């Protein structure tokens, strides 16, 4: 493959964001974007990725589970992905020593977004060989899609919760712009923006980063939410997620934070020992549809929620969490979806994780050892 090319394009983002985006190409042809907190006149991010990389990764396949009606991704190549490397070999750190060239060729950056080298879904696909064709149901499909890595800082030991406000605003911009870019791909059914934090929940790289999955199908949880939303619309004419937000605001027992544009509440049937949802007041399908005032408030409110999660358990500094943005599907049923964040932790007490055991893993029947009202009380108690 040719070495990475010179900058192809520099654009300034939405009018309310002072930063800029620079698009680059990695040595194996994968796309890369630098999102800078401030627009810089003149050349930026000129470092070239010269690593001798193998062919760009190809996607695996998705198989249909006829018992549940769900697609399962078979990504055997991910077995060999980088697992908890030392800081010197971190693939997300800037490249300051050519002998330790990372995925990011520049010596510094604010936020870097690039296509994952070990993707679950990729634009380059091969037709599944299907040596064992399905006995029942549809044939295997290529796992078409996109998997972005979103690096939140060049500082290996930083945490999202501690980043400056301007950086958090840039991260929101990166989430929104990448959602928009993937949503116009006709092969993409839904875009999921998420972060896993903490080795306890299987994080393989400690450098602060999140991910974006652009799925070729509507994922099972979304399909379930959409089915409920369709029933609700047929029965009442309303949007389920909007009506839930309104009901939680009116009832207020589980509301933990109210902004001008967003409200956070613990869901009435929370499944996790720590769980909170954040919803915009306006009906919007995804992060890309948020206006400047909403993006600005989201940056502030999101960090406040992360601070509260970190303070949830006395004596624990860094609570492991999963943060996931549910967005409307890009095609069919788009009008039934509505943007909301699900932020939760598996940590039920210091040193004790909630494991998904028999009832949850085997039957999908959840048992929460605390009450949603108690979770909400604690999240209000630890407010900044
Ligand atoms: Zn690093």
Image (cartoon, rainbow, N blue to C red):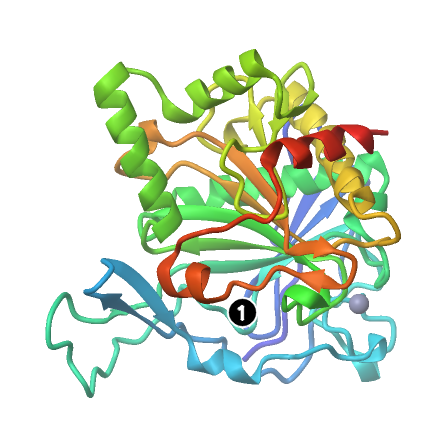
**Numbered label tally:** 1
- Relative depth, front residue between 6 and 97: 97
Nearer-the-camera pick, 286 or 236: 236
Rendered image quadrant of residue 37: top right
27 left or right of 43?
left
Looking at the picture, how far across and down is residue 129, in whole percent? 23, 83
Residue 171 shown left or right of residue 94 in the figure:
left
Identify which residue is drawn at 63% across, 48% down. 273
Image coordinates of residue 367 in percent, x first then y, are 50, 51
Quadrant the C terminus occupies? top right
**Crowd band around label 1 with a 10 angstrom C-alpha radius: few (<14), some (14–19), many (20+):** some
Seen from the viewer's position, the closer of residues 155 and 277 is 277
Viewer-nearest residue: 174 or 275: 275
Q: In terms of image quadrants, where is residue 65?
A: bottom left
Q: Is residue 316 above or below residue 172?
A: below
Residue marked by disc 1: 29
Whole-percent x, y for residue 56 in the image: 50, 76
Residue 37 appears in the rendering: no
- Residue 254 vertical position relative to residue 111 in the rendered view, above or below: above
Outermost residue on the left side: it is 136
Secondary structure at numbered mark 1: loop
Q: Quadrant for the N terminus, please.
A: bottom right
Quadrant of the rendered image holding ligand 1: bottom right
Q: Given the current orientation, which residue lies at the most extreme bottom position?
A: 131
Q: Is residue 86 left or right of residue 232?
A: right
* Figure check: 150 above or below 378: below
Q: Residue at x 64, y 56 (%)?
A: 346
For this orientation, the residue located farthest to the top is: 250
Question: Looking at the image, can residue 51 be seen?
Answer: yes
From the viewer's perspective, is residue 82 above or below residue 317?
Answer: below
Please name the residue shown 45% across and 47% down the image: 191
Q: Is residue 230 left or right of residue 185?
A: left
């Amino acid at each position: 493959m040719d070495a990475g090319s010179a900058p192809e394009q520099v654009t300034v983002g939405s009018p309310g964001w002072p930063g800029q985006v620079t698009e680059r190409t990695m040595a194996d042809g994968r796309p890369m974007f630098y999102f800078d907190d401030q627009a810089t006149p003149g050349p930026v991010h000129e470092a070239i990725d010269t690593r001798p990389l193998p062919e760009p990764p190809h996607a695996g396949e998705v198989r249909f589970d006829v018992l549940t009606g769900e697609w399962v991704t078979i990504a055997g190549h991910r077995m060999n992905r980088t697992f908890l490397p030392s800081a010197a070999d971190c693939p997300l750190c800037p490249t300051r020593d050519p002998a330790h060239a990372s995925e990011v060729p520049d010596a510094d950056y604010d936020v870097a977004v690039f296509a994952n080298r070990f993707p679950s879904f990729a634009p380059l696909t091969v037709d599944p060989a299907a040596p064992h064709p399905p006995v029942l149901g549809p044939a295997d499909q290529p796992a078409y899609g996109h998997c972005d890595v979103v690096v939140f800082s060049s500082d290996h030991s930083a945490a999202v919760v501690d980043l400056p406000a301007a950086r958090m605003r840039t991260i929101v911009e990166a989430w929104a712009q990448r959602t928009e870019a993937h949503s116009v791909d006709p092969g993409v059914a839904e875009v999921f923006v998420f972060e896993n934090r903490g080795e306890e929940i299987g994080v393989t790289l400690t450098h602060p980063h999140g991910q974006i999955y652009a799925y070729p199908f509507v994922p099972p949880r979304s399909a379930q939410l959409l089915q409920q939303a369709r029933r609700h619309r047929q029965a009442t004419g309303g949007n389920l997620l909007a009506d839930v937000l309104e009901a939680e605001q009116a009832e207020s027992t589980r509301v933990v934070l109210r902004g001008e544009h967003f409200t956070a509440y613990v869901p009435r049937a929370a499944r996790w020992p720590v769980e909170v949802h954040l919803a915009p007041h306006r009906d919007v399908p995804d992060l890309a549809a948020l206006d400047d005032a909403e993006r600005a408030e989201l940056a502030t409110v999101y960090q406040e929620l992360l601070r509260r999660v970190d303070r949830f358990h006395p004596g624990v500094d860094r609570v492991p969490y999963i943060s996931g943005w549910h967005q409307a599907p890009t095609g069919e049923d788009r009008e039934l979806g509505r943007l909301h964040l699900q932020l939760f932790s598996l940590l039920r007490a210091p040193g004790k994780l909630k494991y998904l055991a028999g009832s949850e893993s085997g039957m999908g029947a959840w048992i929460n050892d605390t009450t949603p009202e108690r979770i909400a009380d604690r999240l209000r108690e630890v407010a900044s």
